[in-house]
Image (cartoon, rainbow, N blue to C red):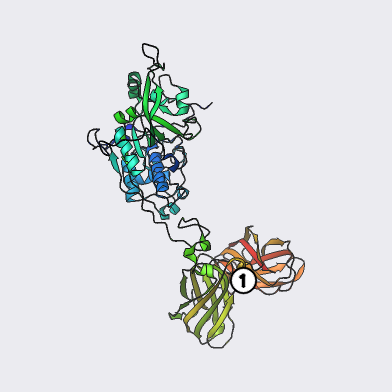
Amino acid sequence: MPTNQDGDAPLSNLDDLMNGAPGKGDLPEEGKADAVYPPQYLELVGKQSPVKSQGRRGVCSIFATAAYMEHLYITEGTIPNPDFSEQFLQWSVKNEVKAYTNTEGSNADRNLEAIYRFGIVEEAAWPYESSKWTTANDPRCDGSESQPTICYTNGDPPASAMTAQRWRLPRGRWVSSTARSIKAYMTTKKVGVVVGGPFYYQAWNHGASTLPTNQDYWRKGYVTYPNAKDKEESEKHRAGHAVLLVGWDDDLEVQSRDGDGKLLTDAEGKPVMEKGFFLFKNSWGTGSFGVSNPNGAGYGWISMKYVEEFLTAYGSGLPEVKPPAEVCNDGVDNDRDGKADCEDSDCANDGACTGSTGSYASTTQVPIPDNDPNGASSSIAVNEGGTIGAMSVTVDITHSYSGDLVVKLVREGGGEVVLQSKQGGGDDDVKKTFSVTEFNGQDAAGTWKLVVIDTAKADTGTLNGWQLAITRCTGSQCVSGAKTYESNQSAAIPDGDATGVFTNISVLDSGSIKAMRVDVDITHPSSMDLSVKLQRVGVPGEAVLVAPAILDGAFGKRSFPVSDFIGQDASGTWRLVVADTASGDTGTLNGWALVVTR
């Protein structure tokens, strides 16, 4: 049987909850004086996100506000299953609003200010941590009053959270906490309100109560008006709590208790009943409190008299939701319309869905420095996504000795292909089109760079311009029969050792090789020292991918088309051999992949 001793019912600092709240008589009544409200109002229950648990942290107002925000977004309707980050909201209140920086608590006023002014991210961007930081996380988080704000926020947001989309609500306001005002607010705006204030332990049947509690009331989520003894005892260890009100029942009756926990009866022996309760959504999980509540585990009923006399109320309105535009090739329903990528009509004309060919050009002239390993480079940004089915690179290079040149296509973020390496001898210029298959199957969007390196003295030239042509494929068009086999085994490359180091990839699939590519990931400061070869164990012959003094600069991730094994059966053990032929530098073979098209 679940009890209120489970440790999942943390409380908050009362002064934080009440800070800045107006007096009970300072707010106008909501609604019309002659308005009549139904005896039960439960239609908002179906517009709530799942009940969560704040764990062992005193952040009830954060959870109540986040639950309120999710409720408002569900009511608005654009996002069917919103889940916002309580962790981020706690951080924003203390670091962006700059409130409650030396305490774990906060209140709905400042929470909604953070959401209105700055916005918060979704839960996936910074998931909630149910335990507060201790010295195990940071030596300064010792629980003292002098510990820094970072101890109350469990650190700072990850970079991904700081760059994620932020979601907002309209500016909030205080609402009169009389039962009529709260009913008027709920029925006219069709949304709930956040309430918070003093916590009376016996009234809540809390495990920390010094007075007897009622386990049946705890399971049903009943919170009655506190008796005089409960008020007196609770003042000795003051605390607060915040919840989200989502409905009411004027006819619900719960028997009152005295300070000894005895159910009260009148002189005639009839039960003394308290009548009229608001329905609330709590943040103590679903395993103990309110497990028998008919509206769902984790929900409770709180006395209207308790709310009117002790609690403050705060409300906001429906958001104006502007989801991001649909990205047509990321597998995500970005605009939240239930359709992702090419299923979304927004992508009807996108290259990722039409299979169209796009041409991208740079006409900026760039001088090629003589005998400079850095060379000349020119970039083209491709903003339109889509799976690459075919690619070609057309270059226009003026140079008096083409045999000096190394021409490479580099993808920013990883991958490069050597288009031409010291070919042509004394011929002038390089004006030709290269077919590139190494990036087939990858997404087209990104920054592409053409790099031209002059590896010898005496001759100079200019990169006049270049063009990137990309044909995108869709659906079955993208199935080319290519399969990737990987080795993630890392191996140190011995310095100045012609034998080098190797790792193997076993290919069990048979079939005649129609095309082959080797993707290599090597860390080494001097490409000129390296020899890289592809071999078949037990089969004569090898493909030299890199010979010493062919490539300049540091080695990284590179791709090499291989034609030496075309027509052979793919099955067998393939070996990548990497040797450092000169002394002075060391490196590592991080891994490699074999891409085979049958």
- Residue 462, compared with residue 53, is above or below; it is below
For the point 42% across and 44% down, which residue is it?
A: 87
Q: Taking 593 as reference, is 232 left or right? A: left
- Residue 41, compared with residue 478, is above or below; it is above
Q: How many marks?
A: 1
> From this viewpoint, which residue is outermost toward the left?
26
Q: Which residue lies under the disc numbered 1?
A: 560
Q: Depth check: 532 or 42 in front?
A: 42
Residue 446 on image: x %, y %: 49, 67
Q: Taking 128 as reference, is 181 left or right? A: left
Look at the image and tell me in which quarter the N terminus lies.
top right
Q: Depth check: 597 or 421 in front?
A: 597
Residue 134 appears in the figure? no
Residue 366 on image: x %, y %: 44, 79
Q: Depth check: 183 or 224 in front?
A: 183
Look at the image and tell me in which quarter the C terminus lies.
bottom right
**What SS does tag 1 mark?**
strand
Residue 570 on image: x %, y %: 73, 67
Identify residue type, mark 1.
Phe
**Image quarter of residue 565:** bottom right
Residue 204 on image: x %, y %: 40, 26
Residue 576 appears in the figure? yes
